[in-house]
Image (tube, helix red, strand yellow):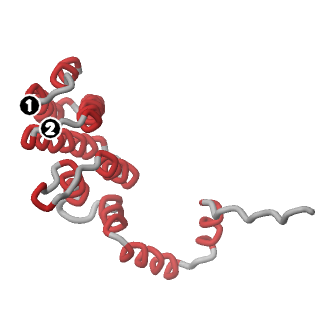
Amino acid sequence: MRMANKPSDPSWGDVKAKLAEHDRAGLLSLVQDLYAASKENQAFLHARLHLGDDVLKPYKATLARWLWPDMFKSQGTSVARAKKAIADYKKAVGRADELAELMVFYCEQASGFSCDVGLQDEGYCDALVRMSEQALKVTATLPEAQRPALIARLDSVRQRCHNLGYGVGDDMDAL
């Protein structure tokens, strides 16, 4: 007995074909519904369209939440969710100067929290070192005038990391 073919999951091609059927008003209505559906969608559209005074604000708030949680509220850390905020920004716009700012902010939050509470989490520390390396690489692509402030902030992170375990300070020196 032959089984019927299972319909495949919809793909971007399927979505694109359906969108082509909509007029301008229909597309605007769809984007409005997506905008209202989540804070992440709002942050994406604000960043993509460069709306507001600080398009990085929601991304920084996410980084702060997951990298420097409120221990009195029993909040935990999540490197994955913090890194997702940076990936989400990169998808929305991905401007190198703003991406570098987010990456440096990540490093400041992670190192500050680790030192503040004495966090001893090897995965968290490894992610900090990797993000520092990425931040340095992105910073190196920026115009010369934009680099010194970011490098100075990363150097402060590097110095702070000598108070952590797992050889993080040595790894940061090597970068």
* Picture residue at 59% right of the left edge, 71% below the top: 19
* Picture residue at 15% right of the left edge, 32% below the top: 154
**Image-based side of 97 in relation to 6, left or right:** left
**Does 13 appear above or below 120?**
below
**Does 158 appear above or below 3?**
above
Q: How dense is the environment of label 2, judged by Cα within 10 Å: few (below 14), some, or many (20 and up)? A: many
* Picture residue at 44% right of the left edge, 74% below the top: 31
Is residue 123 or residue 89 the one in the foreground? 123
Name the secondary structure under disc 1.
helix
Picture coordinates of residue 175, whole percent (x, y): 23, 21
Is residue 25 or residue 11 the one in the foreground? 11
What quarter of the picture does the N terminus occupy? bottom right
Q: How dense is the environment of label 1, judged by Cα within 10 Å: few (below 14), some, or many (20 and up)? A: some
Picture coordinates of residue 125, whole percent (x, y): 23, 34
Amino acid at dot 2: Ser
Is residue 135 or residue 64 the one in the foreground? 64
| CB under 8 Å between discs 2 and 1 | yes
**Image-based side of 167 in relation to 24, left or right:** left
Amino acid at dot 1: Arg
Picture coordinates of residue 36, whole percent (x, y): 36, 77
Which mark, by number, is residue 160? 1
Looking at marks 2 and 1 on the same chain, the residue that comes earlier in the sequence is marked by 2
Picture coordinates of residue 149, whole percent (x, y): 11, 35
- The Cα atoms of the two marked residues, 2 and 1, are separated by 7 Å
Which mark, by number, is residue 111? 2
Res. 1 in view = yes
